[in-house]
């Protein structure tokens, strides 16, 4: 037997969570043709159909764009470091796309590699992720090319599948999911299904072999020179995690903070000497591809990509990961 919930009952659950003081993040219609994951004030803001995927990702729920690490106070020759309180608010991500949830176990590696990031891990503990299986895709989606699918449960605590009659099948994947939906569902003999995924467009085994020999290919400028270095690909990507740490404040007090950064920005690798080892945009795009499909897999055994397509979807010149992979495959060795 499956478990189902009506959409009105799901919205009632959202309102109940908000009354309990939990934070609920869900797809929200910002303006026509623009959907974004945002904290909601009430359940009516939650978008459950009519979109392919939001322009941003849920990584900012556990890895904020701007995060205070600690405060400092200067008293004469004494410097006091004041710790920032740990995250404490429980949060539920509702109706996330599977390609977003699948990024969280991938990010876990880098935030727990040589140093365990306590704030990141605390947010992960406090967060329950409920995904909504995809019923459609667009030309930018390529989840099936990276081993995923429209109903992938990786990183999810529960998966919802639209039954098409105002009800959703609920498939709980973890104890968090079971706890969230306890007493909220009804037994049924109906099961949902996701829409057909995109046709695979990249052979990752072949891509990996090509990248072993492609670093000095002369075609990199032709493949990537139209990149504007705006960083939209990285900021909308579920798995990109570059950051910078700076001090904000004055000579006597302030905060050390962590801000998102991008390897596509010209100053990202600029040395204090003035030398920049990646001083032109094709080199920076090459770094992006190698990091996702060569460096990260060799270090952690994981692709740094879930095939969401946001890099191309948000790019002002329609570049992103997939066009470069297709160009690399077409060129061959």
Image: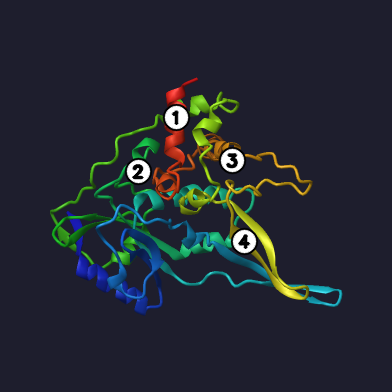
Q: Position of residue 186 (x, y in %)?
A: 18, 64
| Placement of 24 over or under 75, stated as above or below | above
On residue 281, which mark appears?
Answer: 3
Cα separation between marks 4 and 3: 25 Å
Q: Nearer the viewer, mark 2 or mark 1?
A: 1
Q: Nearer the viewer, mark 4 or mark 3?
A: 3
Residue on which the image places disc 4: 258
Tag 2 secondary structure? loop
Q: Residues within 10 Å of mark 2 (few under 14, many from 20)?
A: many
Q: Position of residue 303 (x, y in %)?
A: 48, 39
Contact between marks 1 and 3 (CB within 8 A): the answer is no
Q: Which label's residue is closer to the chain start, 4 or 2? A: 2
Q: Which label's residue is closer to the chain start, 3 or 2? A: 2
On residue 327, which mark appears?
Answer: 1
The residue depicted at 30 percent of the width and 67 percent of the height is: 46
Tag 3 secondary structure? helix
Give residue 180's quadrant in the image: bottom left
| Placement of 146 over or under 9, stated as above or below | above
Give residue 187's quadrant in the image: bottom left
Residue 29 seen anywhere in this rendered image of the structure: no
Cα separation between marks 4 and 2: 30 Å
Q: Position of residue 146 (x, y in %)?
A: 40, 37
Tag 4 secondary structure? strand
The residue depicted at 54 percent of the width and 60 percent of the height is: 120
On residue 141, which mark appears?
Answer: 2
Q: Nearer the viewer, mark 4 or mark 2?
A: 2
**Camera-side residue: 218 or 311?**
218
């Amino acid at each position: 037997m499956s478990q189902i919930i009506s959409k009105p009952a799901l919205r009632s659950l959202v309102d109940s969570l908000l009354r309990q003081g939990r934070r609920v993040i869900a797809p929200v219609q910002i303006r026509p043709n623009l959907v974004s994951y945002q904290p909601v004030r009430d359940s009516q803001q939650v978008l459950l159909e009519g979109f392919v995927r939001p322009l941003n990702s849920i990584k900012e729920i556990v890895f904020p764009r701007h995060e205070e690490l600690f405060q400092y106070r200067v008293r004469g020759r004494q410097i006091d470091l004041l710790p920032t309180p740990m995250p404490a608010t429980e949060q539920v991500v509702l109706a996330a796309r599977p390609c977003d949830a699948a990024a969280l176990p991938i990010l876990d590696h880098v935030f727990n590699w040589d140093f365990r990031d306590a704030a990141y891990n605390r947010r992960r503990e406090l967060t329950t992720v409920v995904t909504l299986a995809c019923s459609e895709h667009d030309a930018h989606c390529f989840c099936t090319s990276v081993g995923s699918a429209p109903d992938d449960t990786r990183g999810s605590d529960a998966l919802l599948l639209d039954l098409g009659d105002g009800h959703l099948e609920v498939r709980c994947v973890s104890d968090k999911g079971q706890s969230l939906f306890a007493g909220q569902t009804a037994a049924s003999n109906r099961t949902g299904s996701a829409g057909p995924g995109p046709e695979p467009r990249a052979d990752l085994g072949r891509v990996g072999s090509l990248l072993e020999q492609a670093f000095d290919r002369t075609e990199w400028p032709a493949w990537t020179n139209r990149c504007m270095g705006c960083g939209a690909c990285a900021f909308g990507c579920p798995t990109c995690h570059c950051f910078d740490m700076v001090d904000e404040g004055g000579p006597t007090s302030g905060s050390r903070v962590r801000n998102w950064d991008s390897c596509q920005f010209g100053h990202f690798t600029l040395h204090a000497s003035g030398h920049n080892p990646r001083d032109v945009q094709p080199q920076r795009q090459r770094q992006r591809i190698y990091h996702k499909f060569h460096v990260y897999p060799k270090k952690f055994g994981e692709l740094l990509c879930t095939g969401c397509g946001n890099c191309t979807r948000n790019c002002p010149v329609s570049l992103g990961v997939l066009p470069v992979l297709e160009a690399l495959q077409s060129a061959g060795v």
